[in-house]
């Protein structure tokens, strides 16, 4: 099936869905004009024809046409219903990414976008994706409400703190296109933007290689684990007496006072962000600093994912 060419009335389109959205908007605009222009023309005509002081027959007629009454209600309703179905189909498709979609994690924060590729590569503001590949973007915000806006794809999605929203697209045209935050989010809102670069499959793989993106998710988490100084206290051989984290996830932890708790994902997050909470492991002192407000949400998620996969290989004792 041959794709329709893009209209030149709006910014350049980079996907078939964007082209279809353009035609939907244009068709609905034409329908609106066909329904409203005759009404305003009739109003203007009757305002002049029957203006005060003009000799005109103003006698009322008792004749009524039910066919006319039904037609002027039913025909516009059926026509607009066509556009409802058309738009609803596009909306439903936009909410269901295909199984083979490549997932990119995106974090909005004042005042930047941060992206995480499946291979571990991170980008700030600029996003590189391959052509003819479904791209599934999972969005969240670290601070305030943002809105992820890609004019070339006719996509806009609100990004809310504490909530993950999803969008997906399949680009069919290479090039570099602007992306924005379209929700006022603070002083430098106007600077919160970047570029979407759509590349051929070969160019994208080359970009990944030269950008050092060939890194697994656990490896990316390990790098962050070390960069925040976690290894210097919690790895084997550390001089600081701190609980060993290898194999911790899913195990039972004995706390001060004898209470036991399962080290699940919520426990790991809480211990990183608020170590002063009443969850101190038995036999240890509270010397760990709080990372609340220090570690970004996306970095925290990757560290937790790493800890979930961090198994004991040297028989370290579990805290």
Image (cartoon, rainbow, N blue to C red):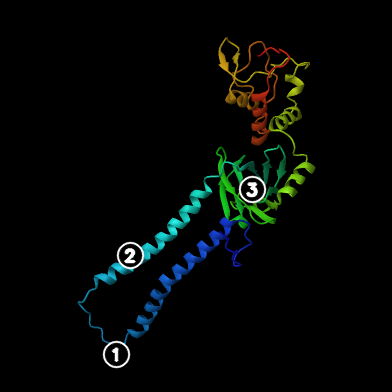
Task: Residue at 70% x, 21% y: name it.
Answer: 288
| Secondary structure at numbered mark 2 | helix
Q: Residues within 10 Å of mark 2 (few under 14, many from 20)?
A: few
The residue at which mark 1 appears reads as: 55
The residue at which mark 3 appears reads as: 133
| Secondary structure at numbered mark 1 | loop
- Cα–Cα span, label 1 and label 3: 70 Å
Q: Position of residue 175 (x, y in %)?
A: 70, 56
| Secondary structure at numbered mark 3 | loop
- Look at the image and tell me whether residue 157 can be seen: yes
Q: Sequence order check: which comes first, mark 2 or mark 3?
A: 2
Q: Position of residue 94 (x, y in %)?
A: 53, 49
Q: Is residue 125 above or below residue 52?
A: above
- Cα–Cα span, label 1 and label 2: 36 Å
Q: Residue furthest front?
A: 1
Task: Residue at 62% x, 24% y: name it.
Answer: 268
Q: Is residue 207 above or below residue 242?
A: below
- Whether residue 21 sits left or right of residue 62 in the image: it is right
The residue at which mark 2 appears reads as: 74
Q: Quadrant of residue 229?
A: top right
- Cα–Cα span, label 2 and label 3: 43 Å
């Amino acid at each position: 099936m041959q794709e329709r060419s893009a209209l030149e009335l709006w910014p350049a389109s980079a996907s078939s869905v964007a082209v279809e959205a353009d035609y939907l908007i244009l068709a609905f605009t034409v329908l609106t004009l066909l329904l409203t222009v005759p009404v305003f023309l009739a109003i203007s005509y009757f305002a002049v024809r029957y203006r005060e002081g003009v000799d005109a027959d103003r006698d009322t007629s008792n004749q009524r046409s039910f066919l006319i009454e039904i037609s002027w209600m039913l025909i516009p309703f059926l026509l607009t219903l066509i556009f409802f179905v058309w738009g609803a189909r596009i909306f439903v498709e936009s909410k269901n990414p295909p199984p083979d979609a490549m997932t990119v994690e995106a974090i909005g924060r004042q005042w930047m976008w941060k992206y995480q590729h499946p291979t571990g590569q991170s980008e700030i503001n600029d996003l590189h994706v391959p052509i003819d590949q479904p791209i599934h973007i999972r969005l969240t915000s670290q601070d305030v409400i943002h809105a992820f806006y890609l004019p070339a794809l006719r996509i806009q999605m609100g990004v809310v703190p504490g909530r993950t929203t999803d969008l997906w697209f399949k680009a069919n045209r290479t090039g570099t296109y602007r992306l924005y935050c379209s929700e006022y989010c603070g002083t430098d809102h106007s600077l919160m933007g970047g570029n979407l670069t759509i590349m051929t499959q070969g160019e994208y793989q080359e970009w990944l290689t030269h950008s050092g993106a060939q890194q697994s998710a656990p490896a990316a988490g390990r790098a962050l684990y070390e960069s925040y100084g976690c290894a210097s206290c919690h790895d084997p051989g550390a001089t600081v007496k701190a609980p060993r984290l290898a194999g911790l996830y899913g195990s039972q932890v004995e706390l001060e006072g004898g209470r036991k708790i399962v080290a699940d994902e919520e426990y790991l997050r809480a211990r990183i962000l608020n170590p002063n909470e009443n969850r101190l492991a038995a036999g240890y002192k509270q010397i760990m600093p709080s990372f609340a407000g220090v570690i970004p949400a996306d970095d925290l998620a990757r560290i937790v994912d790493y800890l979930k996969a961090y198994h004991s290989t040297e028989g370290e004792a579990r805290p």
